Image (cartoon, coloured by chain):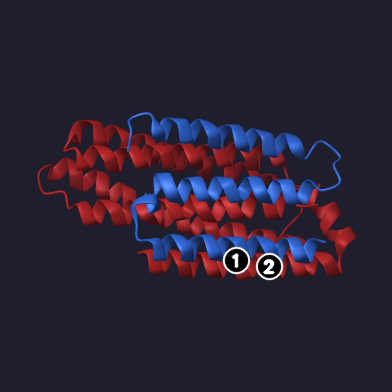
Chain colours: A red, B blue
Amino acid sequence: MWIIIFIELITFGIALIAFVYNGQEEPDMFSESRKLLNINYGAINTLFLLTSGYFMAKFVGAVKGRKIKMATSYLRYSIIGGLLFLGLKGIEYYEKLEAGYTIDFNTFFTYYWMLTLFHVIHVVVGLVILGSLLIGIRRNKKELLLEDVEASAAFWHMCDLIWLLLFPIIYLLN
Amino acid sequence: MKKNTLLSIWIVLVALTIITALITKIELKNTAIVILFLAFIKIISVVFYFMELKKAHSFWKFLFVTFLTSQMLVIIWLVF
């Protein structure tokens, strides 16, 4: 799982370096476009993912301690954090589309849509994994594999990490 | 890991996120470096405590910190 995490981070890392490089070639356009993004949405979404990650870490700890009931609650809170992230992201996307800032509006928004949508796909996949884990716990409380739990948690934390890279570089770095 | 360590890390992460958002509203000379440094701290905190890299082999710690530092340095180099 760590190898997958490294590959993902390297992929996003290269894309972000390309984003910053292009930003230096067209600084005025990137600066003006960045002002069209809502920093509050980005910051609140960061809080949603960090809180979700916190509950995920608590979930893994509870599974290790065989506190299954508590673990189920933590997993639920973690999923809610992910859903809140997607909800706010949906509002943000709706506003951008309404204002006409689509993927072909300019280079900045091409990067914005590609990078954030790619991240959203990861979050959706992560939520599917966490959802199936929750169903698995409910059905089979005693045969919960720690390896599955840790791999799912690592994938979910990876979504945090990617966002922690994307948010400052896309929204804040002027 | 101590019972309250995760909660402490979460509080620090929330505080750093709020500070990051506020810093962008202030006109500073080196805002970009501060923002990237705070992002670096947040990522390291998540990886070491939430993902428990702290307990992993030194090789993985070294690899991750080297990767992240290189990434941040390249971006700072491009920005300035």
Residue under label 1: A13
Chain identity of mark 2: A
Instruction: Provide the secondary structure element on which disc 2 rests.
Output: helix
Instruction: Say which residue label 2 marks.
Output: A17
Residue A171 seen by the camera? yes
- In the displayed structure image, the side of residue A19 where residue A68 appears, left or right: left
Q: Report crowding for label 2: few under 14, some 14 to 19, many 20 or more residues within 10 A (C-alpha).
A: some
Task: Please name whichever residue, A56 or A29, is drawn nearer the observer in this view of the structure.
Answer: A56
Residue A10 percent across, percent down from the top left: 54, 69
Up-down: is A109 above or below A137? below
Q: Position of residue A156 (x, y in %)?
A: 40, 51
Q: For the point 60% across and 57% down, which residue is it?
A: A116
The answer to whether marks 2 and 1 mark residues whose Cβ atoms lie closer than 8 Å is yes
How far apart are labels 2 and 1 at the CA level?
Answer: 6 Å
Residue A148: give x, y in percent of width and height: 24, 56
Q: Amino acid at mark 1?
A: Gly
Task: Tell how many labels.
Answer: 2
